[in-house]
Amino acid sequence: MARASDTPADRGLLSSMERRKTGVRASMTLVHLVLSIGLVVAGLGPILWLAKAALTPTQDTLRQPLALFPTGIDWANLEQAWVDVHIDQYFVNTLVIAFGSWFFQLFIATTGGFGLSVLRPRYARIVEGAVLATLFIPAVVLLVPLYLTIVRPPLLGEDASLLNTYWAVWLPAAANAFNILLVKRFFDNLPREVFEAARTDGASALRLFWSIVLPMSRPILGVVSVFAIVASLKDYLWPLLVLPDPAVQPLSVRLPAIQQSVELDVFLAALAISTLVPIALFLVFQRVFLRSAGLGGAVKG
């Protein structure tokens, strides 16, 4: 039977009275400290090791791979990876593909979700069911027809082809049913009174979308942005198929290809440079992802 002093929010493995005991408080502090150190080591350990290995000669890395500090520092690894292996070119290709995929996925998800949730045409349920049905189709099944569509895109003529162009990556990425349904579900929970008031004031559908719905949807825009960019950075098979020219390939495709032709220290330096993209994007989108004040822009005149 619970004590009267325990509120429903306090009930758990330890009561509030037990937490006040010195031994229990010390044990909890120790457990929290151990868990925090473990999370830091598991999260930052591989990144720090890669940064150390990128500046270490190959022989030192092979001789003492788990050494905390490099016995010798070779800054030429970064320069060679950047200039000789042309990581700079693939780095730019990765950014172009990532930001293009982000823009088109965000555009299609928001406009599609707006049409299904806010405009609500009579056939909205049919379209939503069709979009939902595509989630049950395995991606491998769609690989061949999607590739043939890129090779001979409809409405562009028989001689047109999107191979070796970034459109071959951007357009398929934009047709993401999960993002559309995710944004649509978020739009369903927005206050309808704001929409009705805007329509009463004579706001068009475009004004409603741009000035009211999008400012209220910053949290979900951050979530979709993170999903889109992470998926673009780790995608390997599709860019390999539609971008056969190495000059336009991203890091996810080129790094495995150059592994056998360069020294280990240079390859690790190239890997370290490639990690700058997701780390920088995480730092940029962290505030957008965690920010919850998404309703402030909708009530301003």
Image (cartoon, helix red, strand yellow):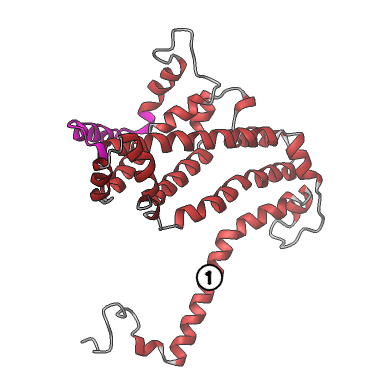
Front residue of 109 and 65: 109
Q: Which residue is mark 1?
A: 36
Q: Quadrant of the N terminus?
A: bottom left
* Image quadrant assignment for residue 258: top right
Work out whether residue 293 or residue 138 is closer to the camera in this orientation and state it.
Answer: 293
Q: Does any portion of residue 70 appear in the rendered image?
A: yes
The amino acid type, in three-letter code, at marker 1 is Ser
Residue 66 drawn at (x, y percent): 69, 59
Q: Is residue 6 above or below residue 67?
A: below
Crowding at dot 1, Cα within 10 Å, few <14 / some 14-19 / many 20+, comes out as: few
Q: Secondary structure at mark 1?
A: helix
User: Going by the picture, which residue comes out furthest to the bottom?
Assistant: 22
Query: Where's residue 161, x and y in %?
Result: 49, 15
**Per the image, is 127 magenta?**
yes
Q: What residue span does the magenta drawing correspond to? A: 117-141
231 is within the stretch colored magenta:
no
Residue 135 seen in this snapshot: no
Residue drawn at 47 percent across, 47 percent down: 226
Residue at 41 percent of width and 46 percent of height: 221
- Foreground of the two, 165 or 198: 198
> Could you say which quadrant of the image residue 43 lies in?
bottom right
Residue at 42% x, 16% y is 153
What residue sits 25% from the left and 46% below the top?
197
Q: In x, y percent, where is residue 239? A: 52, 29
36 to the left or right of 112: right
Numbered-mark total: 1
Q: Is residue 148 above or below residue 100?
A: above
In the image, residue 38 sits, relative to residue 88, either above or below, namely: below
